[in-house]
Amino acid sequence: MGGKGTFRFSVFGFQFEIGNRHSAIENQSGGFTLIELLVVMSIISLLMGIMVPTYSRIRRHTKAMHSMTNQREITSNLNLYASDNDERYPESVAMVGTDEYWNWSDPTKLAGTVKRTPSSHRSMSEYLRSYMSDARTLYCPNAPQRYEYLQMAWDAGDDWDFPEDGSYSEDPLGGTYCFYWNYIGYVGGPRVLFRGPRGPADGGRKYSKLLVTDYFGYDHWRSPWSHGSCEPFEGAKITPETWLLSGYWSKEGDPESPPNIQMRAGFTDGHVETYTPADVTPMKVSISADGITPYPDGVGPGIFYLPRTAFR
């Protein structure tokens, strides 16, 4: 409050003053006119209209930086694991079936259905828990919701079982990042297959250097004929989590007209880069262990988009 009839106030650090005018109402009550109060409210509304979108952009940018930090930590700890294990990354857990009777599952898997062999694990955490104890590192911060039992599942490892189904089975779990070490997918064309790296030294024409990406795909069985991503995009709605799979953002659309999304990908050398749908290659999940037979269109987990730099 300034002198008589003067009102000073601050909004988001900006200082304002309603000046020294007098009226019969002021003379009687020492208050302010209706016009002055409307001016104050108008200024506050204007500033809110300016600051709220700015705050939203800052919040999205902060989460994007958090996701980049997560992926750097994943790549760094995978390389630590490899240095302790003959320069080899863990086996992929994105598999269904055992022995020679198995096929690939979608690359978001944090825990598979069963151990493929006696020496392998069904849960990623059995390989990496001593390197990454906080399960949030393996989860996109821009996803619409964090899986309720994420940390419990990570701590349980191969013993993970969804606690609300009343069974003693070992349940799978899908996350919001895609994990590509020791993974094989069908891309067609002259390359035919995507082959994830077996270790830090892999690369060149046969093996990719790609380790982890944000989820970005199309026509998943939970959201048919829709684009889906752990990153939000215009018009997207929430495909909610299930007892087996995490939630993500999705919207029906043409596969030839992808939404505007900025995503991230981490590589064997530890760097994390951004990319958009304008620079991706579609990959299908394979129903054969060798990767050369993909799921038919409209069936299964759909398409997963890889950054084209995964093939350089």
Image (cartoon, helix red, strand yellow):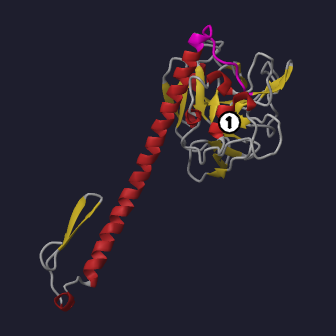
Report the span colored magenta.
82-94
Residue 191, given in percent of the width and then of the height, sits at: 69, 18
Q: Is residue 4 left or right of residue 113?
A: left
User: Residue 86 colored magenta?
Assistant: yes
- The amino acid type, in three-letter code, at marker 1 is Ala
Toward the right, the furthest residue is 101
* Front one among 33 and 133: 133
| Residue 126 visible from this viewpoint | yes
| Residue drawn 63% across the image and 16% down it | 89
Judge whether 124 appears above or below 214 on screen.
above
| Residue 267 visible from this viewpoint | no
Residue 289, given in percent of the width and then of the height, sits at: 81, 20
Q: Is residue 32 left or right of residue 217?
A: left
| Residue drawn 58% across the image and 44% down it | 143
Circle 1 crowding by C-alpha within 10 Å: few under 14, some 14–19, many from 20: many
Residue placed under numbered mark 1 in the picture: 153
Q: Main secondary structure of the magenta part?
A: loop
- Dot 1: what SS? helix
User: Residue 188 colored magenta?
Assistant: no
